[in-house]
């Protein structure tokens, strides 16, 4: 570990300790704590697990088990813009699978992965509760209904600007 | 000086997904530029999503609808002076309440959704809010349970278990720490009623939870909301804060002399956490794996304590029952399916949205009269009822009345009230494959029939799609479905066979395409 990485992980540890304290170091608040960390850092760094385990009096294995169980938590940062496209039944009935293929081809990324320049992540999601305006997408948290390539690209441009 | 012109633009996330924020901003700009005094209220959605953004203008106490209003349409609407219907403007729809889609509904749970500013407590109270809670605060727990039991209310999450009986069990446990957990992990594709309600009338859910707390002697409530619903989470958090400030939650909740507090918790993208015991695990900060039953949560739920677990719609319906009486509520519906059900019309449908009707309405009425058929205009072929674990039905099912009993008789289920339409281009073998794939992605992994069965099922349907040994592989899928139905711990593995077997039963021709294609080569 070089000096730069070390100071970064110290920073993460301080943040984690603070966030756990805000939730009274309660093990039941683990999901909330992980969300807070990801909201602040962009992902749940491997280096944060020991600090969480320590603060909540859990084993590292328990914390890792929770992080890896839930689809939301990522071990590495996502792209600057994250596009989540619904591929559940209602959106499939309006062509979501074709939309996902078109988006991935156009931006040269594989579904579930981040582009080489770290600019874009396209991920599948299963229902955004916008099933009467299918297909549905979420671009950096902003909902896009009746999604097509143009509308999603417009939202990506907006998110970048 | 005259009162400002009141204009409603929804803040519901579905409305936002088609530009409601831009429309509201354009209305503000136009009004300022023209020197017109207006007040913009960001209401929930009326649930007519093909008309979103649906702008309403209040005039002489009547709300007039315009939609869909894009930001670019706003200038012309101001030029025309927001005229009534028939005066020529193509976006003018007439008085909102007189639109067929709304006028033909029986909105009890959704009475205020889309009508009020979701976070205006005074308006909530003026339209009947808090009446049920005030009644409940003066009643004994057992009396509240009795009223809910008499109303015939059944769990709206999908299982349809009588709510009053669940509460009775929790109420009868020895005094001490008890919980009310609201399951707002609405993961079923084709459903959005919970989301609409939390975004459009969040106080009603808090009111229902507080009443449940008084009924069973619980001191704390948790709302477990899926992370895919960021707007609902934000609205619910703000609603809780407002209720705490108003003294409706706290040590002396609503002047009852009893403590009750509510906490909002986020899910993390696991469909299985919509299963009640997985949700409880998740609320305790663990992996969302299913618990073996017994014990049932009513006896040993959150942190091992007696817990009421109810869906958003079940809890949000309780205030109406307390305010207007059990008899009022059970006058709606038929047989053992009493009251109303918020149906959600979704997928390939022309007029998708929320339709709250008494139980017993036919699928045809929902799909044709309300829904207007498919969005693409192609013939209707199939509908999936009750989410990804629900059965597919076809044209032959259109006249089945939507009740728990009639649907069970037709080998289908109501679930959370979602209706997803597909036109003739749908490949039902592909949908059967997807049902297994979804189970594979979302299985918690605890029991073998679900964890392994989903993978093997997907592989076998893929063989069928390639035309390999079709008859034998269909028999194998059917056999596998028996094992999953009988051997799974919860509905994830137990009901995945529903969409698979219904697709095979109703659309056998789709499972034979691979063989036909292979034979032709």
Image: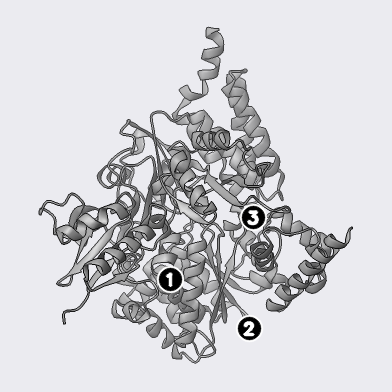
Q: In this view, does B396 lie above or below B34?
A: above
| Cβ atoms under marks 1 and 3 closer than 8 Å | no
**Total marks in image:** 3
> In front: mark 2 or mark 3?
3
Gap between marks 1 and 2, in whole Å?
Answer: 28 Å
Task: Give SS at disc 2.
Answer: loop
The image's colouring method is: one colour
Percent of width and height locating residue B84: 13, 59
Residue B176 image label: 2
At label 1, counting other C-alpha atoms closer than 10 Å, the crowd grade (few under 14, some 14-19, many 20 or more) is many
Residue B78 image label: none
**Sequence-wise first label, 1 or 2:** 2
Q: Label 2: chain?
A: B
Q: Label 1: chain?
A: B
Please give the residue where the numbered disc 1 appears in the rendered image: B202
* Quadrant position of residue B436: top right
| Cβ atoms under marks 1 and 2 closer than 8 Å | no
Residue B276 lies left or right of residue B120; in this view the side is right
| Cβ atoms under marks 2 and 3 closer than 8 Å | no
Please give the residue where the numbered disc 3 appears in the rendered image: A72
Do the dots labelled 1 and 2 sit on one chain? yes
Of residue B167 and residue A93, the one placed in the foreground of this image is: A93
At label 3, counting other C-alpha atoms closer than 10 Å, the crowd grade (few under 14, some 14-19, many 20 or more) is some
Gap between marks 1 and 3, in whole Å?
Answer: 25 Å
> In front: mark 1 or mark 2?
1
Percent of width and height locating residue B468: 62, 18
Task: Give SS at disc 3.
Answer: loop
Which residue is farthest right? A1
> In front: mark 1 or mark 3?
3
Task: Give SS at disc 1.
Answer: helix
């Amino acid at each position: 570990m070089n000096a730069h990485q070390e100071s970064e992980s110290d920073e993460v540890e301080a943040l984690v300790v603070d966030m756990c304290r805000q939730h009274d170091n309660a093990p039941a608040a683990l999901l909330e704590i992980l969300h807070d960390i990801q909201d602040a850092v962009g992902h749940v760094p491997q280096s944060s697990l020991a600090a969480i385990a320590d603060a909540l009096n859990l084993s590292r294995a328990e914390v890792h088990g929770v992080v890896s169980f839930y689809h939301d938590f990522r071990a590495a940062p996502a792209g600057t813009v994250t596009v989540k496209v619904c591929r559940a039944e209602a959106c499939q009935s309006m062509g979501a699978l074709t939309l996902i293929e078109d988006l991935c081809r156009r931006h040269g990324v594989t579904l579930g992965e981040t582009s080489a320049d770290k600019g874009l992540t396209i991920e599948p999601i299963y229902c955004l509760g916008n099933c009467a305006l299918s297909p549905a997408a979420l671009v950096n948290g902003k909902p896009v209904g009746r999604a097509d390539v143009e509308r999603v690209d417009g939202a990506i441009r907006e998110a970048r600007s | 000086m005259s009162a400002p012109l009141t204009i409603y633009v929804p803040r519901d996330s579905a409305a936002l997904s088609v530009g409601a924020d831009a429309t509201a901003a354009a209305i503000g700009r136009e009004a300022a530029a023209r020197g017109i005094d207006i007040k913009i209220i960001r209401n929930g959605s009326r649930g007519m999503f093909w008309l979103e953004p649906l702008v309403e203008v209040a005039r002489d106490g009547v709300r007039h609808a315009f939609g869909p209003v894009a930001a670019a349409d706003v200038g012309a609407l101001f030029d025309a002076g927001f005229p009534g219907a028939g005066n020529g403007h193509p976006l003018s729809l007439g008085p909102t309440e007189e639109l067929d889609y709304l006028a033909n509904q029986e909105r009890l749970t959704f009475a205020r959704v889309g009508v009020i500013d979701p976070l205006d407590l005074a308006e909530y109270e003026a339209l009947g809010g808090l009446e049920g809670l005030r009644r409940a605060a003066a009643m004994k727990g057992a009396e509240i349970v009795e009223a809910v039991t008499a109303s015939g209310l059944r769990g709206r999450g999908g299982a349809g278990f009588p709510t009053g009986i669940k509460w009775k069990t929790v109420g009868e446990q020895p005094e001490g720490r008890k919980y009310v957990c609201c399951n707002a992990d609405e993961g079923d594709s084709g459903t959005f009623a919970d989301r609409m309600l939390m975004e459009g009338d969040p106080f009603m859910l808090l009111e229902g939870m507080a009443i449940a707390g008084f009924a069973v002697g619980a001191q704390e409530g948790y709302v477990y909301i899926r992370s895919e619903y960021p707007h609902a989470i934000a609205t619910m958090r703000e609603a809780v804060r407002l209720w705490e400030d108003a003294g409706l939650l706290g040590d002396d909740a609503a002047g009852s002399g009893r403590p009750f507090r509510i906490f909002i918790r986020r899910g993390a993208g696991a469909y299985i956490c919509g299963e009640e015991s997985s949700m409880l695990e998740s609320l305790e900060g663990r992996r969302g794996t299913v618990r073996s039953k017994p014990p049932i949560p009513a006896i040993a739920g959150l942190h091992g304590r007696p817990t009421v677990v109810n869906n958003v719609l079940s809890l949000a319906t309780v205030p109406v029952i307390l305010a207007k009486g059990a008899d009022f509520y059970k006058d709606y519906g038929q047989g053992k399916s009493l009251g109303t059900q918020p149906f959600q019309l979704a997928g390939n449908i022309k007029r998708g949205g929320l339709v709250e009707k008494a139980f017993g309405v036919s699928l045809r009425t929902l799909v044709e009269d309300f829904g207007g058929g498919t969005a693409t205009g192609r013939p209707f072929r199939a509908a999936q009822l009750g989410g990804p674990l629900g059965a597919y039905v076809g044209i032959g099912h259109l006249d089945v009345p939507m009740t728990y009993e009639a649907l069970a008789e037709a080998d289908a289920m109501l679930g959370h009230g979602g209706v997803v339409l597909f036109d003739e281009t749908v490949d039902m073998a592909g949908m059967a494959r997807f049902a297994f794939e979804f189970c594979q992605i979302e299985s918690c992994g605890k029991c073998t029939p679900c964890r392994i069965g989903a993978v093997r099922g997907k592989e076998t349907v893929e063989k069928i799609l390639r035309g390999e040994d079709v008859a034998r592989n269909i028999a194998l899928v059917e056999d596998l479905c028996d094992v999953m139905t009988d051997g799974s711990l919860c509905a994830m593995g137990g009901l995945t066979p529903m969409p698979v077997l219904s697709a095979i039963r109703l659309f056998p021709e789709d499972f034979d395409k691979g063989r036909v294609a292979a034979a032709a080569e």
